[in-house]
Image (cartoon, grey):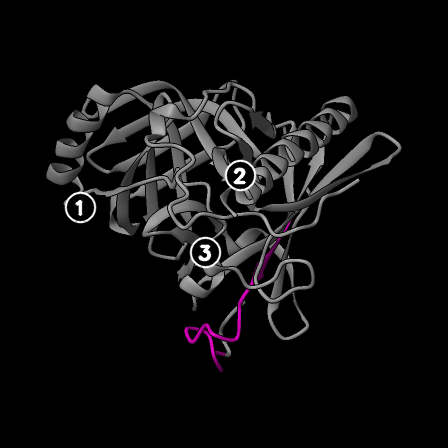
Amino acid sequence: MSDGHLFNNILLGGRGGTNPGQLRVHSGGVAWRKLGGGKVVELDKADIAGVTWMKLPRAFQLGVRVKDGLSYKFIGFREQDVSSLTSFIEKTIGIKPDEKQLSVSGRNWGELDINGNMLTFLVGSKQAFEISLADVAQTQLQGKNDVYLEFHVDDTTSANEKDSLMDLCFHIPNSNTQYVGDENHP
Amino acid sequence: GNYRGPVKASSEMNTYKNVSDIPFSKELMIQVDQKNEAVLFPIYGCMVPFHVSTIKSVTSNQDNRTSTVRIIFNVPGTPFSPHDANSLKHQGAIYLKEITFRSKDPRHSSEVVQLIKTLRRQVTSRESERAERAT
């Protein structure tokens, strides 16, 4: 297939960091192939539920949410890629990419938003971080107000990060009414 | 030692103005930005900034070849972090309380812990001095 856009050196972000690879956005969907072989991510356009752009320091991140609730993050686009890809995605996949913003305020208080498998910590309606609940090995309620999320530790991944996330804890004060009596809360 | 007094957490806390002000790093690892008094954590491939005044304590643990870095943030209603104007203002907010990283590089992790502690001390003593002068 010759249609679509090809990007070299696009990082796939996940719990263990990022892996470099090649991303192709074509009329049938999105495909990412790890540099040197190995992992392949193929997203059919019929399965794509949402697309987002987020500006990072020196790069843009394309987020693709699929209908089973998972979300993929592709990092490393340039500013000019954003506009061309946006119109291409709108035209061929039929989804208008949303814009998300990274929280730069440095605060540790905000809101939690759970959408499918993704849990987002929002600070002042901007995203501080997003984690995949599929990577969570265990959750624990400690006391009345603290929720621990423990992540799978995978030694075999070749991801490049030096420091990797092990666990997170959110403090939900009594004054929070969002999750009172919510059995589905992680 | 660890200074445990309440840290002035301004409700106008704005560590960075723009995404492009965040220092760029090629490597995903915990970083300390002295200039902006921030600590950056690699979460899902992104560097996420937190102002040093949100941090209550930081510890590292070494065993064999891996080490862990645990950061505990200020949350309301716990001993040593009394309700300040800030937490009252943000009723209903959810707090990030703790985050733990495993590091492949023990030297880096102990260095980063020291840097966070030092920066924290500097900022706290500056803020308490400022509070004293104000009275």
Q: Is residue A170 magenta?
A: yes
**Badge 3 and badge 2 in a common chain:** no
Q: Position of residue B63 (x, y in %)?
A: 87, 36
Q: Where is residue A147 in the image (x, y as percent from the top left)?
A: 60, 65
Q: Tag 2, which secondary structure?
A: helix
Residue, x 10% and y 38% (percent of image)?
A91
User: Viewer-proximal residue, B123 or B29?
Assistant: B123
User: Is disc 3 in contact with disc 2, using a CB cutoff of under 8 Å?
Assistant: no
Q: Where does the image place residue B13, in percent across and percent down from the top left?
A: 41, 43
B63 w.r.t. A66: above or below: above
Frontmost of labels 3 and 2 is: 2
**In terms of sequence position, does the residue under pointer 1 or pointer 3 come before the other?**
1
> Which residue bears the numbered disc 1?
A95
Magenta stretch holds residue B131 = no
For mark 2, does the 10 Å Cα neighbourhood hold few (<14), some (14 to 19), or many (20 or more) residues?
few
Q: Is B132 situated above or below B111?
A: below
Mark 1 or mark 3, whichever is nearer to me: 3
Label 2, label 1: how far apart the Cα atoms are = 52 Å
| Residue under label 3 | A119
Image position of A76 with respect to A131: above or below: above
